Image (cartoon, helix red, strand yellow):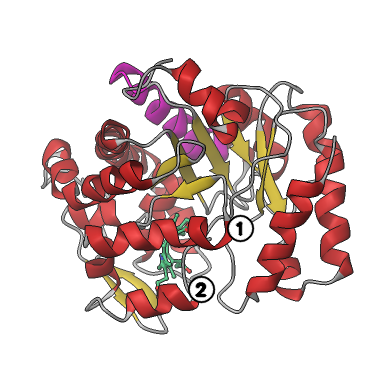
Amino acid sequence: MNDSKGGLMASEAQKPLLSVLSGKRQDPVPIWMMRQAGRHLPEYLELRSRAKDFLDFCYTPSLATEATLQPIQRYDMDGAILFADILLILDALGQTVRFEKGVGPIVQTVEAGQRLNTVPPQKAAERLSPVYETVSRVSSRLDPSKTLIGFAGAPWTVALYAIEGRGGTDKSTARIWAHQYPAELDLLLDDIVEATALYMQAQVEAGANALMMFESWAEGLPNDVFEQIVILPNRKLVSRLNELGVDVPIIGFPRGAAAMLPAYARETGVNAVGLDTSVVPAFVNREIPMQFPVQGHLDPLLLLAGGIAMERRVEELLESYRDRPHIFNLGHGVLPQTPIPHVEKVVQTVRNWKR
Ligand code: 1CP
Protein backbone atom coordinates (compact mmCIF):
# COMPACT_ATOMS: atom_id res chain seq x y z
CA MET A 1 0.00 0.00 0.00
CA ASN A 2 1.13 3.45 -0.85
CA ASP A 3 -0.41 6.88 -1.11
CA SER A 4 0.22 9.97 -3.13
CA LYS A 5 1.19 11.98 -0.07
CA GLY A 6 4.48 10.25 0.71
CA GLY A 7 3.81 6.56 1.24
CA LEU A 8 1.63 4.59 3.58
CA MET A 9 4.19 4.19 6.34
CA ALA A 10 4.43 7.95 6.84
CA SER A 11 0.67 8.58 6.75
CA GLU A 12 -0.12 5.54 8.89
CA ALA A 13 2.30 6.66 11.58
CA GLN A 14 0.59 10.04 11.64
CA LYS A 15 -3.00 8.88 11.34
CA PRO A 16 -4.24 6.65 14.19
CA LEU A 17 -7.46 5.70 12.38
CA LEU A 18 -5.54 4.56 9.30
CA SER A 19 -3.19 2.61 11.52
CA VAL A 20 -6.13 0.68 13.00
CA LEU A 21 -7.38 -0.08 9.50
CA SER A 22 -3.98 -1.64 8.76
CA GLY A 23 -4.54 -4.01 11.70
CA LYS A 24 -2.79 -2.26 14.60
CA ARG A 25 -4.33 -1.44 17.97
CA GLN A 26 -4.14 2.24 18.91
CA ASP A 27 -4.31 4.12 22.20
CA PRO A 28 -6.45 6.07 22.50
CA VAL A 29 -8.95 4.25 20.32
CA PRO A 30 -9.69 6.49 17.29
CA ILE A 31 -13.23 7.80 17.04
CA TRP A 32 -15.59 9.27 14.46
CA MET A 33 -19.38 8.98 14.04
CA MET A 34 -21.54 8.22 11.04
CA ARG A 35 -23.58 11.33 10.18
CA GLN A 36 -21.32 13.38 12.44
CA ALA A 37 -21.97 16.24 10.03
CA GLY A 38 -25.59 17.19 9.70
CA ARG A 39 -28.67 18.32 11.43
CA HIS A 40 -27.63 17.96 15.08
CA LEU A 41 -25.08 20.76 14.51
CA PRO A 42 -26.34 24.37 14.50
CA GLU A 43 -23.39 25.38 12.31
CA TYR A 44 -24.52 22.78 9.74
CA LEU A 45 -28.07 24.13 9.71
CA GLU A 46 -26.69 27.60 9.08
CA LEU A 47 -24.54 26.35 6.20
CA ARG A 48 -27.40 24.28 4.77
CA SER A 49 -29.66 27.34 4.58
CA ARG A 50 -27.26 28.85 2.04
CA ALA A 51 -27.95 26.16 -0.58
CA LYS A 52 -31.05 25.91 -2.74
CA ASP A 53 -31.58 22.25 -1.89
CA PHE A 54 -29.67 19.27 -0.52
CA LEU A 55 -28.26 18.14 -3.90
CA ASP A 56 -27.06 21.65 -4.60
CA PHE A 57 -25.43 21.60 -1.17
CA CYS A 58 -23.59 18.34 -1.97
CA TYR A 59 -22.45 19.70 -5.36
CA THR A 60 -21.09 22.99 -3.95
CA PRO A 61 -17.49 22.31 -2.86
CA SER A 62 -17.22 25.40 -0.63
CA LEU A 63 -20.29 24.29 1.40
CA ALA A 64 -19.55 20.54 1.39
CA THR A 65 -15.96 21.25 2.50
CA GLU A 66 -17.13 23.27 5.49
CA ALA A 67 -19.73 20.62 6.40
CA THR A 68 -17.04 17.90 6.29
CA LEU A 69 -14.73 19.90 8.56
CA GLN A 70 -17.33 21.10 11.09
CA PRO A 71 -17.34 17.94 13.27
CA ILE A 72 -13.53 17.90 13.24
CA GLN A 73 -13.43 21.49 14.41
CA ARG A 74 -16.09 21.00 17.07
CA TYR A 75 -15.28 17.51 18.38
CA ASP A 76 -11.72 16.80 17.20
CA MET A 77 -12.85 13.50 15.64
CA ASP A 78 -10.06 11.31 14.21
CA GLY A 79 -11.91 10.74 10.96
CA ALA A 80 -13.57 13.21 8.60
CA ILE A 81 -16.21 11.67 6.36
CA LEU A 82 -16.68 13.36 3.04
CA PHE A 83 -19.93 15.31 2.99
CA ALA A 84 -21.96 13.85 0.13
CA ASP A 85 -24.76 11.27 -0.20
CA ILE A 86 -24.99 7.68 -1.41
CA LEU A 87 -27.68 8.70 -3.92
CA LEU A 88 -25.41 11.04 -5.92
CA ILE A 89 -24.28 8.10 -8.03
CA LEU A 90 -27.87 7.50 -9.21
CA ASP A 91 -28.21 11.17 -10.10
CA ALA A 92 -24.94 10.93 -12.07
CA LEU A 93 -26.20 7.78 -13.82
CA GLY A 94 -29.19 9.73 -15.06
CA GLN A 95 -31.87 8.64 -12.54
CA THR A 96 -33.33 11.90 -11.27
CA VAL A 97 -32.92 12.33 -7.51
CA ARG A 98 -34.70 14.93 -5.38
CA PHE A 99 -34.56 15.50 -1.64
CA GLU A 100 -37.89 16.69 -0.36
CA LYS A 101 -38.06 18.45 2.97
CA GLY A 102 -39.69 16.25 5.57
CA VAL A 103 -39.97 13.31 3.12
CA GLY A 104 -36.36 12.44 2.22
CA PRO A 105 -35.03 11.27 -1.12
CA ILE A 106 -37.27 10.64 -4.14
CA VAL A 107 -35.53 8.68 -6.89
CA GLN A 108 -36.66 7.96 -10.44
CA THR A 109 -37.35 4.22 -10.46
CA VAL A 110 -36.03 1.50 -12.76
CA GLU A 111 -38.12 -1.27 -14.31
CA ALA A 112 -37.05 -4.91 -14.16
CA GLY A 113 -34.60 -5.46 -17.00
CA GLN A 114 -33.69 -1.78 -17.31
CA ARG A 115 -29.96 -1.12 -17.23
CA LEU A 116 -28.27 1.86 -15.64
CA ASN A 117 -26.08 2.42 -18.66
CA THR A 118 -27.68 5.28 -20.57
CA VAL A 119 -24.94 7.40 -19.03
CA PRO A 120 -21.67 5.45 -19.45
CA PRO A 121 -19.94 4.75 -16.08
CA GLN A 122 -16.91 6.88 -16.92
CA LYS A 123 -19.19 9.79 -17.80
CA ALA A 124 -21.20 9.30 -14.59
CA ALA A 125 -18.01 9.42 -12.53
CA GLU A 126 -16.94 12.60 -14.34
CA ARG A 127 -20.27 14.23 -13.52
CA LEU A 128 -19.35 13.90 -9.86
CA SER A 129 -16.29 16.14 -10.20
CA PRO A 130 -17.59 18.67 -7.61
CA VAL A 131 -17.31 15.86 -5.04
CA TYR A 132 -13.62 15.34 -5.91
CA GLU A 133 -13.07 19.07 -5.59
CA THR A 134 -14.52 18.83 -2.07
CA VAL A 135 -12.21 15.91 -1.22
CA SER A 136 -9.22 17.84 -2.45
CA ARG A 137 -10.14 20.99 -0.50
CA VAL A 138 -10.75 19.02 2.70
CA SER A 139 -7.53 17.08 2.23
CA SER A 140 -5.48 20.27 1.98
CA ARG A 141 -7.04 21.71 5.15
CA LEU A 142 -7.08 18.61 7.34
CA ASP A 143 -4.48 18.12 10.07
CA PRO A 144 -2.07 15.27 9.13
CA SER A 145 -3.27 13.27 12.16
CA LYS A 146 -6.80 13.05 10.71
CA THR A 147 -8.05 10.44 8.23
CA LEU A 148 -10.25 11.53 5.35
CA ILE A 149 -12.85 8.85 4.56
CA GLY A 150 -14.39 8.77 1.11
CA PHE A 151 -17.51 6.66 0.61
CA ALA A 152 -20.24 5.35 -1.63
CA GLY A 153 -23.39 3.35 -1.18
CA ALA A 154 -22.76 -0.37 -1.63
CA PRO A 155 -24.43 -1.86 -4.73
CA TRP A 156 -27.52 -3.48 -3.18
CA THR A 157 -28.41 -0.40 -1.11
CA VAL A 158 -28.10 1.88 -4.14
CA ALA A 159 -30.12 -0.56 -6.28
CA LEU A 160 -32.78 -0.65 -3.58
CA TYR A 161 -33.34 3.13 -3.83
CA ALA A 162 -33.53 2.86 -7.63
CA ILE A 163 -36.17 0.12 -7.30
CA GLU A 164 -38.16 1.51 -4.38
CA GLY A 165 -37.92 5.14 -5.48
CA ARG A 166 -37.80 6.47 -1.93
CA GLY A 167 -36.63 5.89 1.60
CA GLY A 168 -38.87 4.86 4.46
CA THR A 169 -40.53 1.92 2.67
CA ASP A 170 -40.57 -1.67 3.94
CA LYS A 171 -38.11 -2.55 1.08
CA SER A 172 -40.34 -5.42 -0.06
CA THR A 173 -40.47 -4.31 -3.72
CA ALA A 174 -36.67 -4.54 -4.00
CA ARG A 175 -36.51 -7.70 -1.93
CA ILE A 176 -39.08 -9.40 -4.15
CA TRP A 177 -36.86 -8.57 -7.17
CA ALA A 178 -34.16 -10.76 -5.65
CA HIS A 179 -36.55 -13.72 -6.02
CA GLN A 180 -38.54 -12.73 -9.09
CA TYR A 181 -35.94 -11.05 -11.31
CA PRO A 182 -32.56 -12.33 -10.05
CA ALA A 183 -30.80 -12.06 -13.43
CA GLU A 184 -32.09 -8.52 -14.02
CA LEU A 185 -31.05 -7.53 -10.49
CA ASP A 186 -27.54 -8.91 -11.08
CA LEU A 187 -27.15 -6.72 -14.17
CA LEU A 188 -28.39 -3.66 -12.28
CA LEU A 189 -25.89 -4.40 -9.51
CA ASP A 190 -23.09 -4.77 -12.07
CA ASP A 191 -23.89 -1.36 -13.56
CA ILE A 192 -23.74 0.17 -10.08
CA VAL A 193 -20.48 -1.62 -9.25
CA GLU A 194 -18.68 -0.22 -12.29
CA ALA A 195 -19.78 3.42 -11.85
CA THR A 196 -19.16 3.25 -8.10
CA ALA A 197 -15.64 1.87 -8.55
CA LEU A 198 -14.71 4.78 -10.83
CA TYR A 199 -16.34 7.22 -8.41
CA MET A 200 -14.41 5.85 -5.44
CA GLN A 201 -11.16 5.72 -7.40
CA ALA A 202 -11.54 9.43 -8.19
CA GLN A 203 -12.15 10.21 -4.50
CA VAL A 204 -8.88 8.48 -3.61
CA GLU A 205 -7.03 10.31 -6.37
CA ALA A 206 -8.36 13.56 -4.91
CA GLY A 207 -6.98 12.70 -1.45
CA ALA A 208 -9.26 10.27 0.43
CA ASN A 209 -7.17 8.10 2.81
CA ALA A 210 -9.75 5.34 3.26
CA LEU A 211 -13.08 4.28 1.76
CA MET A 212 -16.34 3.06 3.25
CA MET A 213 -19.13 1.14 1.50
CA PHE A 214 -22.53 1.76 3.11
CA GLU A 215 -24.66 -1.36 2.71
CA SER A 216 -27.33 0.18 4.91
CA TRP A 217 -30.17 -2.15 3.91
CA ALA A 218 -28.57 -5.57 4.21
CA GLU A 219 -31.09 -6.54 6.85
CA GLY A 220 -33.53 -9.42 6.70
CA LEU A 221 -32.21 -11.20 3.61
CA PRO A 222 -32.20 -15.01 3.34
CA ASN A 223 -28.60 -16.25 3.52
CA ASP A 224 -28.40 -17.40 -0.11
CA VAL A 225 -29.82 -14.06 -1.29
CA PHE A 226 -27.38 -12.23 0.99
CA GLU A 227 -24.50 -14.09 -0.68
CA GLN A 228 -25.77 -13.20 -4.13
CA ILE A 229 -26.81 -9.56 -3.76
CA VAL A 230 -24.63 -8.32 -0.89
CA ILE A 231 -21.43 -10.37 -0.63
CA LEU A 232 -20.85 -10.96 -4.35
CA PRO A 233 -21.37 -7.35 -5.54
CA ASN A 234 -19.35 -5.98 -2.57
CA ARG A 235 -16.55 -8.38 -3.53
CA LYS A 236 -16.79 -7.27 -7.17
CA LEU A 237 -16.52 -3.65 -6.09
CA VAL A 238 -13.46 -4.33 -3.93
CA SER A 239 -11.83 -6.35 -6.75
CA ARG A 240 -12.56 -3.66 -9.30
CA LEU A 241 -11.01 -1.04 -6.99
CA ASN A 242 -7.93 -3.24 -6.64
CA GLU A 243 -7.79 -3.64 -10.42
CA LEU A 244 -7.94 0.13 -10.79
CA GLY A 245 -4.92 0.43 -8.50
CA VAL A 246 -6.81 1.88 -5.53
CA ASP A 247 -4.72 0.96 -2.50
CA VAL A 248 -6.41 2.55 0.51
CA PRO A 249 -8.19 0.43 3.14
CA ILE A 250 -11.89 -0.25 2.66
CA ILE A 251 -14.48 -0.47 5.45
CA GLY A 252 -17.62 -2.43 4.65
CA PHE A 253 -20.80 -1.66 6.62
CA PRO A 254 -23.40 -4.36 6.01
CA ARG A 255 -26.05 -3.04 8.36
CA GLY A 256 -28.31 -5.80 9.61
CA ALA A 257 -26.09 -8.62 8.26
CA ALA A 258 -26.58 -10.45 11.59
CA ALA A 259 -25.28 -14.03 11.34
CA MET A 260 -23.93 -13.30 7.83
CA LEU A 261 -21.44 -10.72 9.17
CA PRO A 262 -18.50 -13.17 9.47
CA ALA A 263 -19.06 -14.36 5.87
CA TYR A 264 -19.15 -10.73 4.73
CA ALA A 265 -15.87 -10.00 6.54
CA ARG A 266 -14.24 -13.15 5.15
CA GLU A 267 -15.45 -13.13 1.58
CA THR A 268 -15.68 -9.53 0.32
CA GLY A 269 -12.03 -8.49 0.63
CA VAL A 270 -12.79 -5.49 2.86
CA ASN A 271 -10.10 -4.47 5.37
CA ALA A 272 -12.54 -3.75 8.20
CA VAL A 273 -16.23 -4.08 9.04
CA GLY A 274 -18.59 -1.51 10.48
CA LEU A 275 -20.80 -3.06 13.16
CA ASP A 276 -24.43 -2.09 13.57
CA THR A 277 -26.31 -1.38 16.79
CA SER A 278 -27.63 -4.89 17.34
CA VAL A 279 -24.32 -6.74 16.92
CA VAL A 280 -23.19 -8.81 19.93
CA PRO A 281 -19.50 -8.22 20.87
CA ALA A 282 -18.95 -11.84 22.00
CA PHE A 283 -20.23 -13.03 18.60
CA VAL A 284 -17.80 -10.69 16.80
CA ASN A 285 -14.85 -11.84 18.87
CA ARG A 286 -15.73 -15.49 18.41
CA GLU A 287 -16.53 -15.38 14.71
CA ILE A 288 -14.23 -12.73 13.22
CA PRO A 289 -10.42 -13.16 13.53
CA MET A 290 -8.96 -11.00 16.30
CA GLN A 291 -6.55 -9.21 13.95
CA PHE A 292 -9.45 -8.06 11.74
CA PRO A 293 -10.37 -4.38 12.46
CA VAL A 294 -13.90 -3.50 13.55
CA GLN A 295 -15.73 -0.19 13.81
CA GLY A 296 -18.79 0.45 15.95
CA HIS A 297 -21.34 0.34 17.49
CA LEU A 298 -22.92 2.59 20.13
CA ASP A 299 -26.70 2.88 19.78
CA PRO A 300 -27.51 6.35 18.33
CA LEU A 301 -30.56 6.42 20.61
CA LEU A 302 -28.33 5.92 23.65
CA LEU A 303 -26.17 8.80 22.40
CA LEU A 304 -29.34 10.85 22.21
CA ALA A 305 -30.46 9.79 25.71
CA GLY A 306 -27.02 10.26 27.32
CA GLY A 307 -26.29 9.84 31.03
CA ILE A 308 -24.46 7.20 33.00
CA ALA A 309 -25.90 4.35 30.91
CA MET A 310 -24.25 5.87 27.85
CA GLU A 311 -20.88 6.21 29.57
CA ARG A 312 -21.06 2.63 30.84
CA ARG A 313 -21.89 1.27 27.41
CA VAL A 314 -19.02 3.22 25.80
CA GLU A 315 -16.62 1.64 28.28
CA GLU A 316 -18.16 -1.78 27.81
CA LEU A 317 -17.63 -1.59 24.04
CA LEU A 318 -14.03 -0.40 24.50
CA GLU A 319 -13.41 -3.33 26.88
CA SER A 320 -15.05 -5.80 24.51
CA TYR A 321 -12.70 -4.89 21.68
CA ARG A 322 -9.56 -4.18 23.74
CA ASP A 323 -7.67 -7.08 22.15
CA ARG A 324 -8.34 -6.18 18.55
CA PRO A 325 -7.96 -3.18 16.20
CA HIS A 326 -11.01 -1.03 16.98
CA ILE A 327 -12.38 2.29 15.78
CA PHE A 328 -15.09 3.72 17.99
CA ASN A 329 -18.28 4.70 16.15
CA LEU A 330 -22.05 4.37 16.34
CA GLY A 331 -24.18 1.49 15.12
CA HIS A 332 -25.87 3.91 12.70
CA GLY A 333 -25.94 7.67 12.14
CA VAL A 334 -26.17 10.51 14.68
CA LEU A 335 -29.83 11.53 15.04
CA PRO A 336 -30.84 15.17 14.49
CA GLN A 337 -32.10 15.64 18.08
CA THR A 338 -28.80 14.49 19.65
CA PRO A 339 -27.49 16.96 22.28
CA ILE A 340 -23.96 18.16 21.53
CA PRO A 341 -22.73 17.59 25.14
CA HIS A 342 -23.51 13.86 24.75
CA VAL A 343 -21.23 13.61 21.73
CA GLU A 344 -18.54 15.53 23.64
CA LYS A 345 -18.89 13.14 26.56
CA VAL A 346 -18.44 10.08 24.36
CA VAL A 347 -15.32 11.55 22.73
CA GLN A 348 -13.90 12.38 26.16
CA THR A 349 -14.71 8.91 27.56
CA VAL A 350 -13.03 7.20 24.60
CA ARG A 351 -9.94 9.42 24.84
CA ASN A 352 -9.59 8.85 28.61
CA TRP A 353 -9.98 5.08 28.47
CA LYS A 354 -6.83 3.00 28.92
CA ARG A 355 -6.36 -0.49 27.54
O1 1CP B 1 -31.77 17.81 5.48
C1 1CP B 1 -30.59 17.49 5.28
O2 1CP B 1 -29.64 18.21 5.61
C2 1CP B 1 -30.35 16.18 4.58
C3 1CP B 1 -30.06 15.05 5.51
C4 1CP B 1 -28.92 14.24 4.92
C5 1CP B 1 -27.56 14.33 5.25
C6 1CP B 1 -26.92 15.23 6.28
C7 1CP B 1 -29.05 13.29 3.88
C8 1CP B 1 -30.30 12.92 3.17
N1 1CP B 1 -27.78 12.81 3.59
C9 1CP B 1 -26.84 13.42 4.40
C10 1CP B 1 -25.37 13.26 4.35
C11 1CP B 1 -24.81 11.90 4.29
N2 1CP B 1 -25.46 10.79 3.83
C12 1CP B 1 -23.47 11.53 4.60
C13 1CP B 1 -22.33 12.46 5.00
C14 1CP B 1 -22.45 13.00 6.39
C15 1CP B 1 -21.84 12.22 7.51
O3 1CP B 1 -21.87 10.97 7.54
O4 1CP B 1 -21.33 12.85 8.46
C16 1CP B 1 -23.38 10.14 4.41
C17 1CP B 1 -22.18 9.26 4.68
C18 1CP B 1 -24.63 9.70 3.91
C19 1CP B 1 -24.92 8.34 3.49
C20 1CP B 1 -26.32 7.90 3.29
N3 1CP B 1 -27.35 8.55 2.65
C21 1CP B 1 -26.78 6.62 3.65
C22 1CP B 1 -25.91 5.55 4.25
C23 1CP B 1 -25.77 5.74 5.72
C24 1CP B 1 -27.02 5.45 6.50
O5 1CP B 1 -27.53 6.37 7.12
O6 1CP B 1 -27.45 4.28 6.49
C25 1CP B 1 -28.13 6.52 3.26
C26 1CP B 1 -29.06 5.34 3.44
C27 1CP B 1 -28.48 7.74 2.62
C28 1CP B 1 -29.78 8.09 2.00
C29 1CP B 1 -30.36 9.29 2.62
N4 1CP B 1 -29.88 10.54 2.40
C30 1CP B 1 -30.59 11.45 3.14
C31 1CP B 1 -31.58 10.72 3.86
C32 1CP B 1 -32.61 11.32 4.76
C33 1CP B 1 -31.41 9.37 3.55
C34 1CP B 1 -32.15 8.16 4.14
C35 1CP B 1 -33.47 7.97 3.51
C36 1CP B 1 -34.16 6.70 3.97
O7 1CP B 1 -34.87 6.75 4.99
O8 1CP B 1 -34.03 5.66 3.31
91, above or below 12, in the image: below
Pointer 2 residue: 41
Near-viewer residue (320 or 171): 320
**Is residue 163 visible to us here?**
no
Q: Is 252 one of the magenta-colored residues?
A: no
User: Which amino acid type corresponds to the residue marked 1 in the rendered image?
Assistant: His
Report the magenta stretch's main SS: helix
Name the residue rendered at 22%, 79% in the picture. 52
Q: Residues within 10 Å of mark 1 (few under 14, many from 20)?
A: many
Q: Residues within 10 Å of mark 2 (few under 14, many from 20)?
A: some
Local secondary structure at mark 1 = loop
* Lateral position of residue 89 relative to residue 74, left or right: left
Q: For the view shown, which residue lies furthest in the bottom direction? A: 102
* Lateral position of residue 126 relative to residue 318, left or right: left
Which quarter of the rendered image does ligand 1 occupy? bottom left
Near-viewer residue (30 or 102): 30
Name the residue rendered at 34%, 42% in the picture. 139
Highlighted magenta segment, given as a residue range: 225-246
User: Which amino acid type corresponds to the residue marked 2 in the rendered image?
Assistant: Leu
Q: Which mark is residue 332?
A: 1
Q: Earlier in the sequence, mark 1 or mark 2?
A: 2
Report whether the residue tagged 1 is closer than 8 Å to ligand 1.
Answer: yes
Residue 235 in picture, x, y percent from top left:
46, 27
Q: Which mark is residue 19?
A: none
Q: CA distance from mark 1 to mark 2?
A: 17 Å
Q: Is there a contact, CB below 8 Å, between mark 1 and mark 2?
A: no
Residue 130 in picture, x, y percent from top left:
19, 52
